[in-house]
Amino acid sequence: MVRPSMRKSDQMRPVSMETGINKWAEGSCLIKVGGTQVLCTATVELNQPLWKRLQNKTGGWVTAEYSMLPRANGTRKGREAMIKDHRSAEISRLIGRAFRSVVDMEKLGRHTITIDCDVIQGDGGTRCASITGGYVALVLAIRWLMARGRIKENPIQDYVAAISAGLWDGELVLDLDYEEDCVAELDSNFVISGSGKFIEVQATGEQHPFDKEQLSALMDMASAGCKKLIDLQKQVLE
């Protein structure tokens, strides 16, 4: 069986990350995963979010916002619809959770970092690309804070990346593009740390239930894929 992209079952799409893409943001990264392109920008606010201040909480906060530009896909999506998009809200929460899992909020101090992930072009795996590229923007924002003496210790405890995997045409495959994703029998997304631990697993049997063996095999594929993504993050951040 040959995938539409002519890739092997465990072969990822070409990935690139370019930093410094936005001169105003405290950290920025343009990530390209095959045909998917996401602009990730990090904004630093020199105070806590309002809810933490009202509750007299210590430490900082990391959050994220995800959206797709009107012509990120084949059909234009109006900007009003983007505001009411529940899918984007769910993905925003996923991205925020992924980053907070590897950041020590006490070491971050009374700062808020918001990672905006704007999909310029979507071709499958946009949430995973957002996490992988957004992490790079987050690291750069932390470096910005440290360079200005706002924090003394690096609050980032580990790397984090994400990748999709699924069951397509009866075969387990890694890093689904849109053509595969829209007809996949099993669709899953894995968020994994640099130490190889799983941060979040999202798996759905789109057409029929799946078993433990299939999920275990997908986890192994995703682990190998995220290791490659994290190696690339390390190169970009050198």
Image: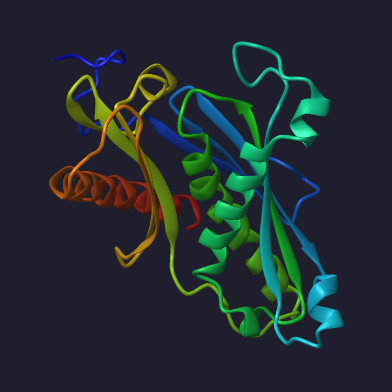
Which residue is at the far front? Answer: 208
Give the x, y percent position of residue 5.
31, 15
**Residue at image location 38% in from the left, 43% down from the top:** 163
Which residue is rendered at x = 79% and y = 35% of the image?
83
Q: Nearer the viewer, residue 228 or 99?
A: 99
- Residue in the image at 61% along x and 54% along y: 93
Residue 11's image quarter?
top left
Query: Where is 183 relative to 17, above or below?
Result: above
Where 129 sits versus 224, above or below?
A: above
Q: Nearer the viewer, residue 229 or 85?
A: 85
Residue 192 visible within the image: yes
Residue 133 placement (x, y as % from top left): 54, 46
214 w.r.t. 115: above or below: above
Q: Residue at x 73, y 42 (%)?
A: 22
- Give the image location of residue 209, x and y in percent: 25, 37
44 lies left or right of 200: right
